[in-house]
Amino acid sequence: MGKKILVVEDEPHIRMSMEARLKANGYVVVTAENGQEGCEKAKTEKPDLILMDVMMPGLDGYQALAKLKEGDKTKTIPVIMLTARAQPEDVEKAGTGGATDYVVKPFTPATLLEKIKKAIT
């Protein structure tokens, strides 16, 4: 059985596209539509990695990351942040918040898969 990845993304087409690509590469995929749902699924599903969009309604990616890093069951799960914002302060905010890596949209599937392999090997 492949490694389990939780995809937290509010855009349905991006979420479905990522899910299909990850499954095609042997990963087990669980999805969430927002930060709150992502935090809940992280506790129940115990993924090996979380791919987290930054800009989402309600609990955004940074807030969800902070919540995950506070939880005993979720604090050790690697999180890769996904965002269209590439400013140095955004990258720094993700890193100081405990993110393992940062991927700027639009990204190629190859780039994402490479970062995933690096984060969970």
Image (spheres, rainbow, N blue to C red):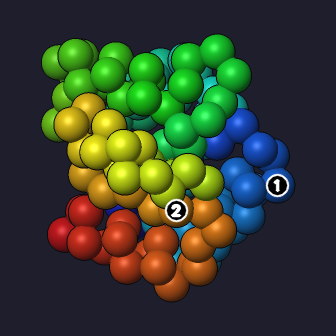
Please say whether residue 49 is visible from this viewpoint: no
- Vertical position of residue 66 compared to residue 51: above or below: above
Task: Choose top left, top right, bottom left or bottom right for residue 89.
Answer: top left
In the drawing, what numbered circle is on residue 104? 2
x and y percentages locating residue 119 in the rendered image: 25, 63
Task: Choose top left, top right, bottom left or bottom right for residue 16.
Answer: bottom right
Q: Secondary structure at mark 1?
A: helix
| Left or right of residue 64, residue 78 in this image | left
| Left or right of residue 32, residue 76 in this image | left
Tally of numbered tags: 2
**Residue at (59% x, 79% y) in the render:** 108
Mark 1–mark 2 Cα distance, whole angstroms, equals 17 Å
- Vertical position of residue 73 compared to residue 9: above or below: above
In the drawing, what numbered circle is on residue 13? 1
| Left or right of residue 13, residue 97 in this image | left
**Residue at (19% x, 69% y) in the render:** 121
**Residue at (61% x, 54% y) in the render:** 84
Split into 4 quadrants, where in the image is the N terminus?
bottom left
x and y percentages locating residue 82 in the rendered image: 51, 52
- Vertical position of residue 72 compared to residue 88: above or below: above
Amino acid at circle 2: Val
Q: Residue furthest front?
A: 88
Task: Choose top left, top right, bottom left or bottom right for residue 93.
Answer: top left
x and y percentages locating residue 117 in the rendered image: 31, 73
Q: Nearer the viewer, residue 29 or 92?
A: 92
Please say whether residue 53 is visible from this viewpoint: yes
Amino acid at circle 1: His
Q: Secondary structure at mark 2?
A: strand
Task: Name which of mark 1 and mark 2 comes first in the sequence.
Answer: 1
